[in-house]
Image (cartoon, rainbow, N blue to C red):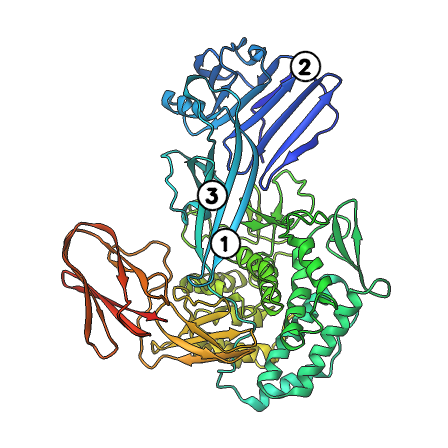
């Protein structure tokens, strides 16, 4: 996976072990020591630098082959080996001896920096030199979810110490942003970039950058909208209601609980109270068994490793700390389902405290709680989780089932929402929104910017630190390779339908690799295909009535899912709501269906970014279909040349901002109208240059209600709704 090119050390230092001296959210400091000699190295995701502290001897930088030395100016060396370029930066006034093994006293100082350079230009190494002495001492992320705009802002911050202020050096580091970061950041970038297994990385100058992502909402379940045979659906529910949840390992038992969780909502929609309560009681019984010490199932806390492990275990969750977020996702999702119907059971004084511990074990959001590490499973800089507890592989760590990682994020969100714990709710939003963006790029490569040119597959089964594999840990069947990053299908799976063309292409690759329609996990793939083509998915289901359900699925859930998707249509990912539990769908006739859930005890008014509003009763899902067909653009991260943005904030009182983009200069008018078509305000009426423009609209003189704003640019017109709430 890699071949060493440079070795940095201290003259005379030999060390038998590597210790962790310090760490941040995505940086770490390693230490080697022997008697009076020591070496520390600070490195991290995105950093082109490694920062060294050296005591007890001269610094040694040894190349594994004779390098080409293209820059040698006192304390700075520029080297190239096998097409890789390095800068070596000693303290000012230092000198280096040697031509392949370099040695320096560091002018009596104790620091050194080595950088991987994007090229071998003099201007490049001199640019890096200005930043090489800002030694990074910490890294930290903060996230904020804005409910009104449905926007998640993640701020990445380095702390640094300027160890050498000579020659105009600055206390700002350089960091290379991954594709999932720079595509969603407004921060100014340099012109430098790197090639990586995750696509192009672009270099940023400075200690802070932010990303902005839209949260597309999560419902606790699909609504009751499908034109299914209700008696048939009830029969399927009753069949499973004869079952009980058996004792089993964390993962297998979790999937069984997840299956029952689906059926709680479906039974409730059918008015099948006896069956609904059976499923809830079974979930309670099994979780309470898990959460009680002793007996056939339990969780045990290991203080040496700061870990909570369920027994019986499996897949190395106990002895390697593997897959904790996968296993916990199903249990937390089940607890969230119970909480929607029994808040007393979910209180912290009862069983809710154990659910919080289970979430913290996998992804602790509370830095002050040292029982568990901060975000154990989630790699903050990589934007997704890892599954191996130790990560001790030549190719780095790995994650197979990105979708089960998303199941954890959704479960944390739903649990936090149901129990009114906004910190946990927002943790779920952060994990879900960030990882969905990374999955699109690194598992699915939906924009063809990551996988190697002419790579023959549409999806990876496993993402490794330094590679990707079209395979799995447990078998080479095409259904396994593609399906492991799809299951479980839940109301939180809408992110998989963000690009409908890709869904069809991915499904078709399974068919091509299989040499026909899927032969295993059929229901999972039908549900997945329904995110893009519900009619076709339903036709496959109806043609195969004797299919074998996936062990985490039920006939009732598959029937309910397929007919709901057929009725409502495919998910719309560019209409947002001012509440976090929602989804929007577009049917083939062009009608929108709006769905939102109100977890609170009071009536809730929900307004969508296209201006549509509806009221939702407490603890209820409400569904409404627009009475006018609309045209919805496909989800596209790159805005159109001519575009009119949704006003912000929306709803507003009384001031809002309207923004729009022009591809070239031209005549522009921007006007506000009532629902009856009466012009109420003229905001712009002149010729404007190309670019993005914003204008403030003050509605102090208007009453609450829905209004239109109309942008005309030459012969093109765009109209949007906005809501004034006083």
CA separation in Å, label 1 and label 2: 45 Å
At 58% across and 29% down in the image, what residue appears?
Answer: 3
Quarter of the image with the N terminus is: top right
* Residue, far front: 701
Apparent side of residue 662 relative to residue 75 in the rendered image (left or right): left
Q: Which residue is mark 1?
A: 144
Query: Which of 97 and 128 lies nearest the eye of the viewer?
Result: 128
Disc sitting over residue 43 in the figure: none
Query: Which of 456 and 672 lies nearest the eye of the viewer?
Result: 672
Q: Residues within 10 Å of mark 3 (few under 14, many from 20)?
A: many
Of labels 3 and 2, the one closer to you:
2
Tell me which corner region of the image, top left, top right, bottom left or bottom right, holds residue 19. top right
Mark 1: secondary structure? strand
Tell me which corner region of the image, top left, top right, bottom left or bottom right, holds residue 549. bottom right
Mark 1–mark 2 CB contact (< 8 Å)? no
Query: Which of 691 and 61 lies nearest the eye of the viewer?
Result: 691
Mark 2: secondary structure? loop
Disc sitting over residue 56 in the figure: 2
Disc sitting over residue 178 in the figure: 3
Give the answer, above or below, for where 539 lies relative to 376: below
Would residue 261 be visible to someone looking at this image? yes
Mark found first going from the N terminus, 3 or 2? 2
Tell me which corner region of the image, top left, top right, bottom left or bottom right, holds residue 189. top left
């Amino acid at each position: 996976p890699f071949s060493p090119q440079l070795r940095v050390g201290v003259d005379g230092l030999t060390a038998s072990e590597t210790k962790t001296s310090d760490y941040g959210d995505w940086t770490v400091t390693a230490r080697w020591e022997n008697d009076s000699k020591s070496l520390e190295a600070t490195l991290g995701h995105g950093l082109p630098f490694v920062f060294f502290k050296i005591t007890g001897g001269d610094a040694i930088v040894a190349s594994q082959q004779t390098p080409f030395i293209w820059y040698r100016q006192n304390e700075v060396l520029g080297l190239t080996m096998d097409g890789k370029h390095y800068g070596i930066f000693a303290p000012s006034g230092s000198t280096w001896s040697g031509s392949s093994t370099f040695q320096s006293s560091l002018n009596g100082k104790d620091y050194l920096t080595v950088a991987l350079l994007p090229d071998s230009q003099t201007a490049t190494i001199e640019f890096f030199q200005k930043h090489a002495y800002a030694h990074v001492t910490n890294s930290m992320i903060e996230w904020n979810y804005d409910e009104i705009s449905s926007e998640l802002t993640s701020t990445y911050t380095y702390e640094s110490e300027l160890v050498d202020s000579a020659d105009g050096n600055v206390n700002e580091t350089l960091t290379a942003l991954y594709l999932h970061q720079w595509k969603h950041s407004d921060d100014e970038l340099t012109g430098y970039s790197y090639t990586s297994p995750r696509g192009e990385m672009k270099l940023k100058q400075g200690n802070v950058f932010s990303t902005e992502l839209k949260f597309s909402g999560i419902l606790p379940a699909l609504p009751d909208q499908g034109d299914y045979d209700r008696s048939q659906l009830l029969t399927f529910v009753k069949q499973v209601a004869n079952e009980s949840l058996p004792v089993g390992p964390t993962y297998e038992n979790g999937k069984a609980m997840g299956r029952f969780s689906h059926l709680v909502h479906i039974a409730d929609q059918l008015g099948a109270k006896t069956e609904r309560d059976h499923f809830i009681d079974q979930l309670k019984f099994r979780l309470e068994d898990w959460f009680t010490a002793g007996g056939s199932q339990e969780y045990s806390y290991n203080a040496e490793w700061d870990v909570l492990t369920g027994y019986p275990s499996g897949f190395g969750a106990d002895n390697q700390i593997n897959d904790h977020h996968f296993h916990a996702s199903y249990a937390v999702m089940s607890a969230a389902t119970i909480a929607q119907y029994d808040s007393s059971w979910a209180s912290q004084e009862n069983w809710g405290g154990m659910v919080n511990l289970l979430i913290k074990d996998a992804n602790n959001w509370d830095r002050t709680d040292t029982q568990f590490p901060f975000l154990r499973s989630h790699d903050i800089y990589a934007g997704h989780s890892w599954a191996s507890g130790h990560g001790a592989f030549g190719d780095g760590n790995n994650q197979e089932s990105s979708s089960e990682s998303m199941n954890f994020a959704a479960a944390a969100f739903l649990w936090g929402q149901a129990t009114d714990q906004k910190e946990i709710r927002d943790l779920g939003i952060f994990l879900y929104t960030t990882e969905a963006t990374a999955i699109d790029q690194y598992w699915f490569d939906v924009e063809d910017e990551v996988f190697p040119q002419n790579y023959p597959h549409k999806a990876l089964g496993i993402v490794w630190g330094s590679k990707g594999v079209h395979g799995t840990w447990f078998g080479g069947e095409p259904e396994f390779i593609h399906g492991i990053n799809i299951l479980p299908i839940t109301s939180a799976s809408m992110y998989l339908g963000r690009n409908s063309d890709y869904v069809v292409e991915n499904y078709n690759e399974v068919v091509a690799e299989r040499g026909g329609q899927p032969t295993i996990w059929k229901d999972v793939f039908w549900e997945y295909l329904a995110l893009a083509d519900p009619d076709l998915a339903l036709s496959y289901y109806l043609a195969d009535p004797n299919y074998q359900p996936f062990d985490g699925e039920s006939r009732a859930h598959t029937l309910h899912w397929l007919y709901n998707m057929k009725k409502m249509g495919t998910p719309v990912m560019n209409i947002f709501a001012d509440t976090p539990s929602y989804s929007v769908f577009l049917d083939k006739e062009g009608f929108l269906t709006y769905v939102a859930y109100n977890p609170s005890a009071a009536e809730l008014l929900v307004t969508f970014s296209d201006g549509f509003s509806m009221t939702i009763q407490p603890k209820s899902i409400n569904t409404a279909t627009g009475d006018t067909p609309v045209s919805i653009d496909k989800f596209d991260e790159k805005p159109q040349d001519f575009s009119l943005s949704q006003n912000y904030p929306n709803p507003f009182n009384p001031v809002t901002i309207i923004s729009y983009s022009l591809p070239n200069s031209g005549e522009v008018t921007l006007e506000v109208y009532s629902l009856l078509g009466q012009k109420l305000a003229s905001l712009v009426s002149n010729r404007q240059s190309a670019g993005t423009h914003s204008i403030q609209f003050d509605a102090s003189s208007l009453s609450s209600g829905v209004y239109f704003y109309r942008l005309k640019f030459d012969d093109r017109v765009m109209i949007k709704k906005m809501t004034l709430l006083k």
